[in-house]
Image: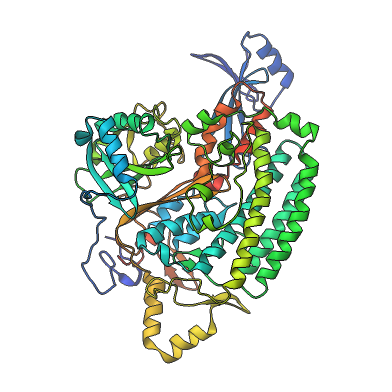
């Protein structure tokens, strides 16, 4: 080195010569690197990279095309949700948690609400209709989440067709969400004690039609990918992680089920009445990306089965309450959709403003102050599309959470990346990460 | 003391019960029988671990959940026994909690454990003084706790001794302070809308 080149500099460190590629003359750089004996290259991948499944940063150490070491860099989407919740009421908490893992908002809300209900001691008082709606919404959400996993996973491996089909089918679910909650994501629909509002007219018909349509449509992606020789070559035997690896790394969800372990909290530690539904736990025994892909494909049908059973149940429960009877916890107003959007129903406004001072006081206290939750701590775990989603909630007896911690499955499962990818080819890390299906909003919270 | 919304002072408690300050309570030990499978877990642990009475400070059963309060010196030993003898193969992470009012044990670390073979859950809790916030790492017992301990260090400043690389994970490397401690302000700025100013959440009038 005679002159300093700002575009392809190299410098000597205690570990030897280090090259950093920032642009400039490629030939000159290659010539300089060729002069050294070392073939180890450190490559930074992400956080803004189309194949890292979000703002995930991977630092890869390569020898030729073989990965010798992987380090994950996360935190680019950290928003301090857990801290913020300590300054809002218990009900407002749902608005925050729903934004964590943004592909499964309803699972986040349910995990949080189950923990709050455990603290309140009202787990068994939540009306059946509310519970069935929760299950139905969660299973719809599982479908929309798996659709993103499949679609983007395939896209990251270079297959564009599956993405179109997946997002077309996801749209069916999002339209149902929009009809029921008013929003396509981040709904804050599931609240401590029940759900925000009852199903609108025609919702069940729309869901029945949607299920029929999806069952037909799901075949498109299945025909496109299952048995496709290019897809098999990119996924079979890739990202291997066996049961022992999953156990010690605390990995749950499709990655664990791909080792042949039928571990599904919906079956084994049922919540929200999952023991009353007929469905199968889908497993694979290949421990690889292909197995995880098959599990997600087959779980779609199981979710459709559960949704159909929910619709049958809901038809029988027409008109039943969707919030706990305790007026000191239940949101005072039934929400209604007006010309200017979702808000308190006009009947309720008429009552509190015109007829009952006590109702007005009650409404004001509950909405501004919120309800008190007895002191203590609770942990509620549910099976989210990505594995065990746990909510650790601590109350000091006040109207705001003292501490909320989410054990997000993406955060935990991402630790499996080095075990899955080291020793493999650099192109395969994309498939391995996609098969974990990390959602960075949940990882970083 | 900051002046909050509508000139609220002090705690900003406008609930009509002025001066009522609640604290996260420090539960006493639960009495046997604990109910559910908790007696079995406690018995098995006592049998497998001779130091039980010394290592386990309190056993709390609350809301259908079993919590073993473990002395920090004994944490790794107890964890090993729980994993190998009692089949708690998985640790679902660690969550820090900061109780500034519990003098001498301000920092808590809570470990939810899961046994897949027995389909059981329990919880370990370790509490240490803020001035000496060191807890032995359980990464050698459950490798999956690596990132969880880094997060708890990042957010609470608890130092997990023996961790293979205890660095910040969510906040930038050069960040100062540990954001989820109770003495760390939420921050934020006042927002003006149609002539009225709303203070940031941590300075608003609030209820206890």
Q: Where is residue B6 in the image (x, y as percent from the top left)?
A: 34, 72
Give the percent coordinates (x, y) of residue A253. Answer: 56, 42
Q: Is residue B135 depicted above or below A210 in this figure?
A: above
Q: In this view, does B81 lie above or below A213?
A: above
As drawn, which residue projects farthest toward the bottom?
A: A355
Q: In which quarter of the image is residue A362?
A: bottom left
Would residue A7 appear left or right of B46 to someone viewing this image?
A: right
A41 sits left or right of A263 in the view:
right
Of B39 and A99, which appears nearest the observer?
B39
Quadrant into which the N terminus of chain A falls: top right
Residue drawn at the location 45% of the way across and 91% of the way down: A354
Please state which of residues A43 and A440 is positioned toward the viewer in this rendering. A440
Residue at image x 60%, y 27%? A421
Residue B151 in the image, given as x and y percentages of width and height: 42, 39
Asked whether the viewer can see residue B126, the reply is no
Q: How many marks?
A: 0
Side (left or right) of A382 relative to A46: left
Q: Is residue B18 visible?
A: yes
| Colouring method of the image | rainbow
Q: Position of residue A258 (x, y in %)?
A: 61, 36
Residue B53 figure quarter: top left
Asked if residue A413 lies left or right of residue B161, the reply is right
């Amino acid at each position: 080195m005679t002159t300093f080149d700002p575009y392809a500099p190299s410098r000597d460190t205690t570990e030897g010569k280090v090259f950093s590629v920032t642009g400039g003359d490629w030939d000159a750089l290659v010539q300089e690197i060729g002069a050294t004996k070392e073939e180890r290259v450190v490559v930074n991948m992400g956080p803004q990279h189309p194949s890292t499944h979000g703002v995930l940063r991977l630092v890869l150490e390569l020898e030729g095309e073989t990965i010798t070491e992987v380090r994950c860099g996360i935190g680019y989407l950290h928003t301090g949700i857990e801290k913020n919740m300590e300054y809002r009421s218990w009900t407002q908490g749902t608005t925050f948690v729903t934004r964590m893992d943004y592909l499964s908002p309803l699972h986040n809300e349910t995990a949080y609400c189950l923990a709050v209900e455990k603290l309140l001691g009202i787990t068994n008082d939540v009306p059946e209709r509310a519970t069935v709606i929760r299950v139905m919404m969660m299973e719809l959400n599982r479908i929309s989440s798996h659709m993103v996993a499949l679609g983007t996973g395939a896209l990251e491996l270079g297959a564009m067709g599956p993405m179109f089909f997946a997002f077309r089918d996801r749209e069916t679910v999002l339209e149902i969400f929009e009809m029921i909650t008013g929003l396509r994501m981040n709904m804050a629909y599931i609240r401590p004690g029940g759900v925000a509002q009852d199903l609108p007219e025609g919702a069940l018909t729309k869901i029945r039609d949607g299920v029929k349509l999806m069952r037909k449509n799901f075949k498109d992606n299945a025909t496109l990918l299952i048995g496709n020789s290019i897809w098999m070559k990119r996924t079979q035997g890739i990202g291997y992680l066996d049961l022992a690896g999953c156990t010690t790394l605390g990995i749950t969800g499709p990655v664990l089920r791909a080792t042949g372990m039928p571990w599904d909290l919906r079956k084994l530690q049922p919540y929200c009445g999952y023991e009353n539904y007929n469905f199968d736990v889908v497993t694979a025994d290949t421990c690889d990306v292909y197995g995880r892909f098959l599990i997600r494909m087959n779980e779609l049908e199981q979710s459709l089965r559960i949704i159909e059973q929910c619709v049958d149940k809901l038809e029988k429960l027409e008109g039943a309450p969707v919030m706990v009877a305790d007026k000191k916890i239940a949101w005072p107003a039934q929400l209604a959709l007006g010309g200017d959007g979702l808000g308190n129903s006009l009947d309720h406004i008429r009552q509190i403003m015109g007829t009952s001072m006590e109702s007005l006081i009650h409404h004001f206290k509950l909405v501004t102050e919120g309800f008190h939750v007895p002191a203590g701590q609770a942990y509620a775990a549910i099976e989210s599309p990505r594995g065990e989603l746990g909510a650790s909630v601590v109350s000091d007896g006040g109207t705001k959470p003292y501490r909320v911690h989410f054990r997000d499955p993406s955060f935990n499962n991402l630790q499996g990346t080095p075990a899955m990818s080291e020793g493999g080819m650099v192109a395969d890390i994309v498939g391995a990460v996609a098969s974990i299906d990390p959602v960075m909003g949940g990882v970083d919270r | 003391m900051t002046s909050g919304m509508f000139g609220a002072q002090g705690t900003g408690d406008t609930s009509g019960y002025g001066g009522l300050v609640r604290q996260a309570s420090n539960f006493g030990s639960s009495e046997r029988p604990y109910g559910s499978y908790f007696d079995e877990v406690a018995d098995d642990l006592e049998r497998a671990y001779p130091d039980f009475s010394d290592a386990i400070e309190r056993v709390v059963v609350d809301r259908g959940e079993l919590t073993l309060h473990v002395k920090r010196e004994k944490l790794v030993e107890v964890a090993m026994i729980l994993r190998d003898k009692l089949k708690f193969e998985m640790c679902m992470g660690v969550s820090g909690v900061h109780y500034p009012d519990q003098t001498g044990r301000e920092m808590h670390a809570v470990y939810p454990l899961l046994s897949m073979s027995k389909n059981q859950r329990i919880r370990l809790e370790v509490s240490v003084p803020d001035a000496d916030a060191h807890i032995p790492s359980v990464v050698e017992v459950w490798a999956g706790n690596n990132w969880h301990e880094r997060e708890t260090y990042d957010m609470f400043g608890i130092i997990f001794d023996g961790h293979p690389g205890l660095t910040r994970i969510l906040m930038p490397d050069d960040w100062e302070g540990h954001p989820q401690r109770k003495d760390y302000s939420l921050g934020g700025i006042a927002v003006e809308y149609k002539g009225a100013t709303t203070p940031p959440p941590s300075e608003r009038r609030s209820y206890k």
